[in-house]
Image (cartoon, rainbow, N blue to C red):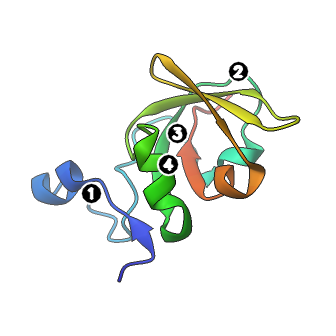
Amino acid sequence: MSRYLFCPRERMSGSNGNGNGDYAQQSGETHPLRLTYLPLETPARVARIDAAGESLVLNFGIYPGVSVQVRQRYPCYVIKCEETEVALEGRLASQIWVYYPHA
């Protein structure tokens, strides 16, 4: 079994030429970082999800390519995903990797 959850649309279309399973990085975006390191209220796109957290976060509608923002860190992470806000434990939030724009 693969270590990362991949976006099926990207695999089928072949637009992800980097070979490491990340959602295709677009111009002006940084290398992926864990969602837990994303500054508050900063828009980002999900790059990948570690296998340990994939089944839970998929149920919340969080998958590669979706826009997300961290709204709160304590007592739990509150993530805005598209038009929905989801509360996640830090352990689960750290399984999500995102791209965000350069400053």
Of label 3 and label 1, which has the lower sequence position?
1
Vertically, is 72 above or below 16?
A: above
In the image, what residue type sits under mark 1?
Asn
Q: Secondary structure at mark 4?
A: helix
Q: Earlier in the sequence, mark 1 or mark 2?
A: 1
Residue designated by label 2 = 41
* Mark 3 to mark 1 CA distance (whole Å): 15 Å
Compared with 13, 86 (above or below) is above
Amino acid on which disc 3 is placed: Glu
Q: Which residue matches tag 3?
A: 29
Q: Which residue occupies the extreme right position in the image?
A: 74
The residue type indicated by label 4 comes to Val
Mark 4 — residue? 57
User: Along the horizontal axis of the image, is 88 left or right of 74?
Assistant: left
- Of the residues tagged 4 and 2, which is closer to the observer? 4
Please tell me whether residue 86 is drawn above or below residue 8 in the rendered image.
above
Numbered circle sitting on residue 16: 1
Q: Earlier in the sequence, mark 4 or mark 1?
A: 1
Q: Which image quadrant is residue 3 in?
A: bottom left
Q: CA distance from mark 4 to mark 2?
A: 20 Å
Q: How many marks?
A: 4
Specify the label residue 25 is tagged with.
Answer: none
